[in-house]
């Protein structure tokens, strides 16, 4: 059960103002603690060396922080893929509306020479109607699986039709919602999803195409846990107890127990810097077991391309023999594509793909109305909570 804490009625203005003030104070206090820990670790970054050659450790690089160049985009073709999805539960059936779009940017002499799209500039949405009874959780999972599957199909077509140097997906490069598969319909969709991911891995590896995932709003705590388990002990071993840092560090280090990666790394990284690279999964977790040997080739790092946005979690698949070359090329492309606006650390090609794939809520309502027009007036489609008379 999630603890609710002190609940305050929104009508109790005096107590509400006090509550809001307390929340703001806590946010400031946590931010200050993260800043102190980050500054102390930055000062010690040259003295802390990570065991990059230890196969039992998640880190595969020896330094805490790496500078990233902003390389001119010359003679490059970058594809970005995103999808949109809407679902509407009704009496007797569920409707799922989705579409995916690829934006293909052609760069010459650091300028965008041409933009192309697949399947088109304004792709038509696809409709799925589910008549089998699904509970709300299974419908949510099925909707997500269908969206991922369509995005992967568009991605495969894009890298097959164009001579692409890098493919950037909106989100992870591994399947999501894999721990919540239960019904036959979701199991079948998941099986197809695994096949699509592994086929895309093969296509990109054979074509030496960078396969990158950009997670827009990561909730991960993976790197925070790596800091606590692997980096903090090394810092204490190398810290100079006479400069006061160790005292301040010990006082504030527990802030990472309750910190998301991006909340901490926002203080730790400067613009055009990235974290060390780490394995996506420290062990062959159930999440990746269905990917077979590919699970050993999936890595991640965080990058901060601009000053006024939090770092972006970047995932990638090792598609060449030289892992360091893959890391540097991935970081350089992500940094160069994401530096257009000081307050938005997303690749421009993904922003464009998102604009092409986005769905308006009215689109699925129109479909619902079209179905209702073909039925008798007494037939009820909407759920009770959506047709209350008052």
Image (cartoon, rainbow, N blue to C red):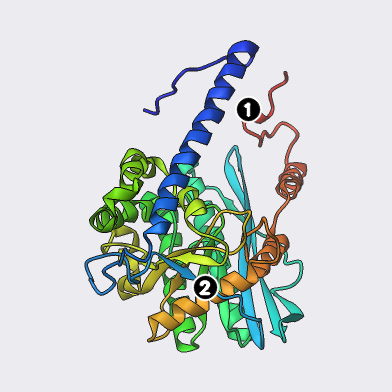
Q: For this rendering, which residue is in front, 46 or 282? A: 46
Q: Secondary structure at mark 1?
A: helix
Mark 1–mark 2 Cα distance, whole angstroms, equals 48 Å
> Mark 2 — residue?
331
Residue appearing at x 60%, y 37% in the figure: 91
Q: For this rendering, which residue is in front, 145 or 238? A: 238
When asked about the image quadrant of residue 379, the answer is top right
Q: Nearer the viewer, mark 1 or mark 2?
A: 2
Q: For this rendering, which residue is in front, 32 or 345? A: 32
Q: In which quadrant will I find the C terminus?
A: top right
Residue placed farthest to the front in the image? 242
Against 30, residue 101 (above or below) is below
The image position of residue 31, as x and y in percent, is 50, 40
Residue appearing at x 66%, y 88% in the figure: 75
Name the N-terminal-most of marks 1 and 2.
2
Q: Secondary structure at mark 2?
A: helix
Q: For this rendering, which residue is in front, 68 or 91? A: 68
> Mark 1 — residue?
385
The image position of residue 372, as x and y in percent, is 73, 42
The image position of residue 27, as x and y in percent, is 52, 34
Q: Is residue 183 visible?
A: no
């Amino acid at each position: 059960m999630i603890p609710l804490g002190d609940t305050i009625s929104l009508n109790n203005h005096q107590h509400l103002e006090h509550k809001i003030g307390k929340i703001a104070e806590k946010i400031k206090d946590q931010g200050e603690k993260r800043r102190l820990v980050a500054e102390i670790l930055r000062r010690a970054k040259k003295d802390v060396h990570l065991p990059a050659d230890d196969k039992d450790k998640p880190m595969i690089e020896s330094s805490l922080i790496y500078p990233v160049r902003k390389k001119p985009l010359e003679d490059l073709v970058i594809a970005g893929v995103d999808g949109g999805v809407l679902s509407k539960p009704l009496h007797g059936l569920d409707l799922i509306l989705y579409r995916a779009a690829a934006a293909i940017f052609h760069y010459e002499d650091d300028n965008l020479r041409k933009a192309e799209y697949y399947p088109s500039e304004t792709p038509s949405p696809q409709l799925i109607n589910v008549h089998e009874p699904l509970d709300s959780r299974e419908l949510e999972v099925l909707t997500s699986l269908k969206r991922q599957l369509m995005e992967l199909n568009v991605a495969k077509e894009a890298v097959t039709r164009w001579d692409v140097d890098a493919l950037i997906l909106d989100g992870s490069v591994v399947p999501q919602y894999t721990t919540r598969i239960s019904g036959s319909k979701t199991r079948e969709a998941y099986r197809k999803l695994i096949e699509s991911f592994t086929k895309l891995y093969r296509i990109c590896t054979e074509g030496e195409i960078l396969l990158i995932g950009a997670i827009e709003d990561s909730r991960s705590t993976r790197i925070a846990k790596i800091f606590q388990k692997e980096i903090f002990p090394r810092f204490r071993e190398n810290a100079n107890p006479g400069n006061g840092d160790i005292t301040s560090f010990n006082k504030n280090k527990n802030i990472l127990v309750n910190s998301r990666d991006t909340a901490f790394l926002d203080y730790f990284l400067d613009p055009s810097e990235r974290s060390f690279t780490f394995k996506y999964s420290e062990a062959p977790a159930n999440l990746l077991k269905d990917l077979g040997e590919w699970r050993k080739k999936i890595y991640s790092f965080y990058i901060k391309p601009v000053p006024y946005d939090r770092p972006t979690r970047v995932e990638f698949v090792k598609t060449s023999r030289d892992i360091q070359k893959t890391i540097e090329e991935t970081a350089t492309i992500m940094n160069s594509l994401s530096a257009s606006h000081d307050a938005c650390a997303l690749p421009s090609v993904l922003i464009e793909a998102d604009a092409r794939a986005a769905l308006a809520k009215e689109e699925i309502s129109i479909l619902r109305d079209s179905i209702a027009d073909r039925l008798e007036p007494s037939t009820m489609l909407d759920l009770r909570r959506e047709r209350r008379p008052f």
